[in-house]
Image: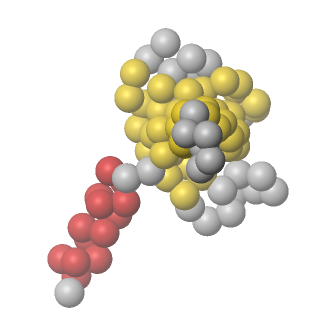
Amino acid sequence: MSEETNTAPEVKARKGRRGEVISKSGDKSIVVQVERRKQHPVYGKVIRMRRKFHVHDEKNEAKVGDHVRIVECRPISRLKRFRLAAIERTA
């Protein structure tokens, strides 16, 4: 059973949302904009939908313009509900 609990965080780390760092809002904090594409149900046009997330960056690694992967976690502050999982591409 302990083996199953050890693999769960690895699986969760691979998943997550991908986005671009648009702001470094303070110490250990970044703002990530995640974009997804959705087709309009009636007209069929592909629409770009964007959303901003406040993310906890423990090591202050990410810079503005980096493409990162974020995962959901416990509430860290009033706005931060995500943490930085990996930096996929640097600016």
Let me know if residue 36 appears in the view. no
Quadrant for the N terminus in the image:
bottom left
Quadrant assignment, res 35? top right
Q: Residue furthest front?
A: 43
**Way the structure is coloured:** secondary structure
Camera-side residue: 38 or 21?
38
Residue 48 picture location, percent across and down: 61, 32
**38 left or right, relative to 4:** right
Quadrant assignment, res 60? top right
**27 left or right, relative to 85:** right
Residue 33 picture location, percent across and down: 63, 33
Seen at 51% across and 21% down, the residue is 66
In the depicted structure, whether residue 12 falls above or below residue 55: below
Residue 69 picture location, percent across and down: 45, 40
**30 left or right, relative to 90:** right
Seen at 44% across and 17% down, the residue is 90
Camera-side residue: 50 or 72?
50
Quadrant assignment, res 34? top right
Q: Residue furthest bottom?
A: 1
Q: Residue furthest right?
A: 78
Seen at 75% across and 32% down, the residue is 26
Seen at 49% across and 52% down, the residue is 71
Residue 58 picture location, percent across and down: 56, 42
**7 left or right, relative to 34:** left
Let me know if residue 45 appears in the view. yes
Q: How many marks?
A: 0
Q: Residue furthest top?
A: 91
